[in-house]
Image (cartoon, grey):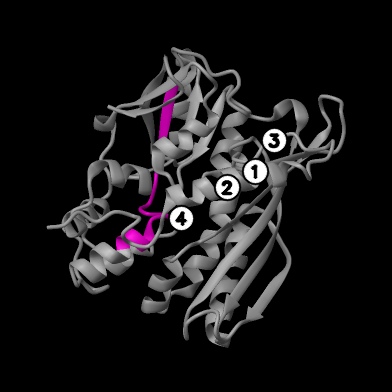
């Protein structure tokens, strides 16, 4: 079987990175005095004052990708509305921010009232659960841009953190512990590759069983994106967290590196957790190489945080008390900045 990659499924991550490298100078040229972060952080930081306790706005913008296509196949549009909220909250808490409000953008070839209502219903339910206000947005009907029956959902969420409470990874040192938090499945990333492997290569239906999972493919793919926000914000009051990463596109290697300072290398012990069966099915159906799986999917780890080794057990205990499946997944070593799956 020919091995399937994300690029062959239609997503060229390296081409996007080359494009962003060309655009960075033009983007940075717009920065004003309040900007505290560079491009590439999970949320953009904008300071409203200079003193240590001054509020800093943290903003993130993201979408749910082609999970919308699976939702449309199953008639489960409410899932992606909620996922947009949960994904965005996770991006904000990475830097210690408390989410405040969300603006959404929904575009389609033709607006289906029932579908749009389901998306917004899911979005609203997740907002209420996470204490986020849905304050506005844009709904666009764009025939000729999207295929009939297709749509896209994007959101911009804003949160706040005190300037002296920002979590940025700068204090990470060799010897620190890496803690993993379990995902529910794919969350909102890698769906183009998953669809190519499961539906195009293997010709599976939404109702096909996932071996070892006790659920069909459709249910496994539409599991809600887990939100770690409340657990992480509570943990910040109990344990000093040095750095965090929301494991989205790019997998563990592409996201954990974003919080690592120079001279620090994260070694993740693969044997410390078992990935949900849906990932095994995707890999077998598409003949996807291990490296491609780990740089495309979260592989069962939805969120990662770094703490001092002496705080690791206490952090794991608190996270479990907060109903999170957490474990010590690896450690920080001295070496070239990067992430190693061992």
Q: Which residue is mark 4?
A: 225
Q: Which residue is mark 3?
A: 37
Q: Earlier in the sequence, mark 3 or mark 4?
A: 3
Q: Residue at x 30, y 46 (%)?
A: 292
Question: Pointer 1: what residue?
Answer: 24
Q: Earlier in the sequence, mark 1 or mark 4?
A: 1
The answer to which of 317 and 82 lies nearer the viewer is 82
Q: Quadrant of residue 143?
A: bottom right
| Local SS, label 4 | loop
Of badges 4 and 2, the one in the foreground is 2
Distance, label 3 to label 4, CA atoms, is 26 Å
Q: Name the spot of residue 298 as percent of width and height, x first.
A: 38, 45
- How far apart are the two marked residues, 1 and 4, measured between alpha carbons? 30 Å
**Which quadrant holds the C terminus?**
top left
Q: Is residue 250 left or right of 173 when viewed as pictured?
A: left
Residue at screen point 65% across, 79% down: 140
The residue lying furthest to the front in this view is 22
| Residue 249 visible | no
Q: Which residues are magenta?
A: 177-194
In the rendered image, the quadrant that contains the N terminus is bottom left
- Residue located at (37% from left, 30% from top): 327
Q: Earlier in the sequence, mark 2 or mark 3?
A: 2
Which of labels 3 and 4 is toward the front?
3
Separation (CA) of disc 3 from disc 1: 13 Å
Residue 178 to residue 99: above or below: above
In the displayed structure, would residue 169 be above or below residue 253?
above
Position of 342 with respect to 87 (left or right) is left
Q: Earlier in the sequence, mark 4 or mark 2?
A: 2
Q: Which residue is mark 2?
A: 20
Image quadrant where residue 202 sits: bottom left
């Amino acid at each position: 079987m020919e091995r399937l990659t994300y690029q062959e499924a239609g997503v060229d991550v390296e081409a996007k990175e080359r494009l962003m490298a060309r655009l960075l100078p033009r983007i940075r040229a717009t920065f004003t005095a309040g900007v505290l972060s560079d491009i590439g952080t999970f949320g953009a930081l904008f300071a409203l004052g200079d003193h240590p306790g001054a509020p800093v706005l943290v903003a993130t913008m993201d979408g749910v990708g082609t999970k919308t296509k699976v939702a449309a196949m199953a008639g489960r549009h409410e899932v992606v509305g909620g996922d947009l909220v949960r994904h965005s909250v996770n991006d904000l808490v990475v830097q210690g921010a408390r989410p405040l409000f969300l603006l959404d953008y929904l575009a389609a070839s033709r607006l289906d009232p029932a579908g749009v209502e389901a998306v917004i219903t899911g979005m609203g339910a997740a907002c209420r659960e996470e204490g986020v206000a849905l304050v506005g947005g844009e709904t666009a009907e764009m025939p000729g841009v999207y295929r009939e029956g297709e749509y896209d959902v994007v959101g911009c969420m804003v949160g706040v953190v005190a300037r002296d409470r920002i979590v940025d990874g700068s204090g990470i040192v060799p010897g620190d512990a890496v803690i993993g938090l379990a995902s529910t499945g794919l969350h909102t990333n890698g769906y183009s590759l998953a669809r190519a492997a499961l539906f195009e290569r293997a010709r599976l239906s939404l109702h096909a069983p996932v071996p070892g999972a006790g659920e069909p493919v459709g249910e496994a793919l539409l599991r809600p994106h887990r939100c770690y926000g409340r657990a992480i914000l509570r943990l910040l009051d109990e344990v000093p967290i040095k750095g965090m990463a929301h494991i989205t596109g790019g997998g563990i290697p592409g996201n954990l590196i974003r919080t690592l300072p120079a001279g620090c290398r994260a070694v993740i012990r693969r044997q410390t957790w078992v990935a949900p069966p849906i990932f095994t099915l995707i890999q077998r159906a598409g003949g996807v190489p291990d490296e491609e799986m780990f740089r495309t999917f979260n592989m069962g780890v939805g969120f990662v945080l770094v703490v001092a080794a002496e705080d690791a057990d206490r952090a794991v205990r608190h996270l479990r008390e907060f109903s999170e499946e957490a474990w010590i997944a690896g450690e920080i070593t001295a070496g070239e900045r990067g992430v190693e799956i061992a």
